[in-house]
Image: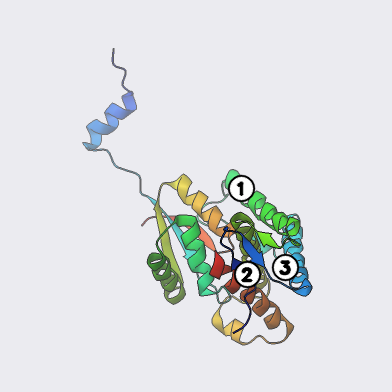
Amino acid sequence: MTIRRASTERELDESGSVATERPWNVIVWNDPVTPMAVVVVVFRRIFGYPEAKCTQLMLIVHHEGRAVVWTGGRERAESYCVKLQVAGLQSTVERDA
Amino acid sequence: MAPRLFTRRRDGRIEVRLSADGRAFVGATAREVVAAEGDVGHAWGAALHAPIDPGRDADDPLAILSRQSDLASNAELVLATLEEATLTDAEAWAWFCTLQVALRSIAVANGLLDDDAWSAQSGPLVEHVQTIQALLFELARVL
């Protein structure tokens, strides 16, 4: 016997498609005292990005005041945000626009 | 060429070449982070208790607990390894995070939130910040 949730059937019937949840962005904000080399090291150790990508993200933070450094599910976004804050960078999460 | 304050050895450990004064400076900084983490009224509170999601009324308590625990344990690890001749990679990372947390906390507590505010500063505060920055530069080279 197959059990299906009534709400799921109704949602499928009404929309004809299943909408996926919008992802969450991890944002790092600029500040005038944190050395650029520090930001690069933090990105490399927390996300495991290559040096060139870390440098590119650091420059976006420096020039634009903020950068999206990771995008994905909410729990992992919050976890990354906590790690960045523990490493001393100003970081927040926000839903992708 | 100026001598390096931290060097990574072949066995992977990081040699600490700080003077007694340098170690005392790092120790005082770590003690301040521990004190600030345990006191919500501390001058560094605004930086240490920043919201994770400003769009929500309340942040996830588990995420906040994780941050508080990691901040305090990093700073405590610094104090526990303050007199060591060499550090493991994880211990050096704890030193790095603690110094950076202190740097950002000092910036927030003193309103140094943009380049103009920073440029207008002088005296002991600038020297203090520059000392932390120098230690961070040196640690960044070996991490």
Reading the image, the residue beneath label 3 is B26
The residue that mark 1 highlights is B66
Gap between marks 3 and 2, in whole Å? 13 Å
Q: Earlier in the sequence, mark 3 or mark 1?
A: 3
Name the image quarter holding the C terminus of chain B.
bottom right
Please report whichever mark, 3 or 2, sits nearer to the chain's N-terminal start.
2
Q: Could you tell me how far apart the alpha carbons at marks 3 and 1 are, in whole angstroms?
A: 24 Å
Mark 3 residue element: helix
Quarter location, residue A35:
bottom right
- Where on the picture, by quarter, is residue B80? bottom right
Between residues B119 and A56, which one lies in front from this camera angle?
Answer: A56
Q: Which residue occupies 23% across, 38% down?
A: A17
Comparing marks 3 and 2, which lies closer to the viewer?
2
Q: Looking at numbered disc 3 in the image, what kind of residue is underneath it?
A: Val
In the rendered image, residue B33, in percent from the top left (x then y), is placed at: 72, 61
According to the image, label 2 marks what residue? B6
**Horizontally, is B81 left or right of B111 in the view?**
right
The residue at 54%/70% (across/down) is B141
Across and down, in percent, residue A14 comes to 24, 34
